[in-house]
Image (tube, rainbow, N blue to C red):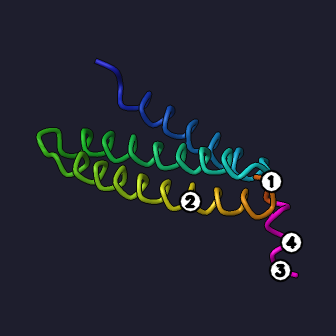
Amino acid sequence: MIPIECYFVLSALLFFIGVYGFVTRRNLIAMLISVELVLNAVDINFVAINRLLYPNGMEGMFMTLFVIGVAAAESAVAIAIIINVYRKFKSDSVDAIQNMKR
């Protein structure tokens, strides 16, 4: 059996990779993927903590399913926004959105 600490380390790595990708990328699609990495790290934490505190319970699994549903809805809305930005500015860069302020 894999120790619980390995799940926490994996979750921390995914979280920090996601945060780093969100902060450093200028491409909207790459930023969306980074947010999804952060949400996956949260999912791993839900399941690992559920296994640690309540080995026979399913609360962490249900919360993970809820987060996956929210992430799917968020991805659909974000992709629709990115497509509209690309159609208007012919770019998928964050800098193109800065033109909307003028």
Observer-nearest of 35 and 95: 95
Q: Secondary structure at mark 3?
A: helix
What is the distance, in whole Å, between disc 3 and disc 1 at their CAs? 16 Å
**Which mark is on residue 101?**
3
On the image, numbered disc 1 is attached to which residue? 91
Q: Secondary structure at mark 2?
A: helix
- What kind of residue is marked 1? Ser
**Which mark is on residue 80?**
2
- What kind of residue is marked 3? Lys
**Image quadrant containing the N terminus:** top left
Whether residues under marks 4 and 3 lie with C-beta atoms below 8 angstroms apart, the answer is yes
- What kind of residue is marked 4? Asn
Residue stretch rendered in magenta on the structure: 95-102
Crowdedness near tag 1: few (<14), some (14–19) or many (≥20) residues, C-alpha within 10 Å: some
Label 2 vs 3, first from the N-terminus: 2
Label 2 vs 4, first from the N-terminus: 2
Q: Nearer the viewer, mark 2 or mark 3?
A: 2
Task: Indicate yes or no whether the magenta region holds residue 97.
Answer: yes
